[in-house]
Image: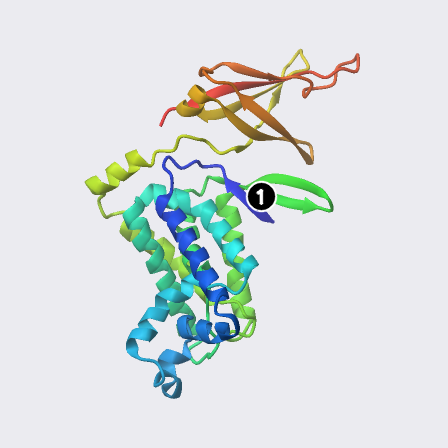
Amino acid sequence: MIPIRDTTPSKTVPVVNYVIIGINVVFFLIELAQGSAQNHFVYLYGLVPAKFTVPQVSAYFPLGMKVLSLFTFMFLHGGWWHLIGNMWSLYIFGDNVEDRLGSARYAVFYLLCGLASGMSQVLFNAHSNIPTIGASGAIAGVMGAYFVLYPGSRILTLIPIIFIPWFVEIPAFFFLGIWFLLQFLNAAGHSGGASGIAWWAHIGGFICGIIFLKIFDRIPTTGVTDRLRQATERKHTHRFQVVRTRRGIDDSNLYGTLTITQYEALVGARKLVTVPWGLQNRLYNVVVPQGIADGQVLRLKGVGKPRSDGTQGDMMLKILVRHI
């Protein structure tokens, strides 16, 4: 299963989330630039539990370097797919959590989740000499917060069946609950870091994300946060939308709703719409013209129910202008 996006739109542009993604990419490029010294670089700036628990290893690292590695490890990655997978998950879940907490609190929240995930890995693999790297522990904290904040949201998921892309919306509580259960089962089934994946970092990050959310949610916002919300207000809805259609009683047309923002209603937009159709999904490009009003209907010709004469009905998309 490949998550594509969630169906809960954020009201603001997730500036901090984008910055975190950018920092991860920069760190990874620096890591690649080390060439033959990359393993040494990873050992130096990765999280190695033995640095803290094994005197023979700890003696080689000053206190400042050991503390630094508690933060730098979460910005290093083991390869392109490791980086892309982590950043995609952060892109999907991070914007909503930042939207709820505000940019400043979200930045601190993310770093604390990463730190907590690292400490969990040290606790359960105390004498390991294998470096732990990756943002997945911090992102697990973000996912834990999302699990609490938006359990009723749905995750648009791609399930490739042979060569047929099947898009299905899975409830967030189920998607994330299954993810957490898999982390726990894998952690219980592997000893130490033998699998090469920091399962306990994922578990610790997820649980601490829930705890930190409860704490941070009680901290009042400041005037700076409110001004940032206004400055980063979203002007666009998701380009990729799922439209649940209903059929007319006595006609061959399909009826659905397409959501856009006030800005998009003014200047126009292009959307990629997927329509569930039995076990398949049909994709359509929809052009929203400039100056469209709330409640107007776009007609997509020839994509409705088949008629008895062999022609097709139309799809009628009612425009819903979202007021933020």
Q: Residue at x 47, y 39 (%)?
A: 153
Q: Amino acid at mark 1?
A: Thr
Asked if residue 149 shows in the view, the reply is: no
Mark yes or no: residue 146 visible: yes
Percent from the top left, x then y, of residue 159?
Answer: 64, 45
* Extreme residue toward the right, this view: 309
Residue located 36% across and 59% down the image: 113
Residue 93 x, y percent position in the rendering: 44, 46
Residue that label 1 marks: 157
From the viewer's perspective, tell me whether residue 113 is left or right of residue 82.
Answer: left
User: Is residue 292 or residue 220 the one in the foreground?
Assistant: 292
SS for callout 1: strand
Q: For the C terminus, give its image quadrant.
A: top left
Where is residue 67? Give x, y as percent: 31, 71
Pick whichever, 7 or 267, lies toward us.
267
Q: Position of residue 103 (x, y in %)?
A: 31, 46
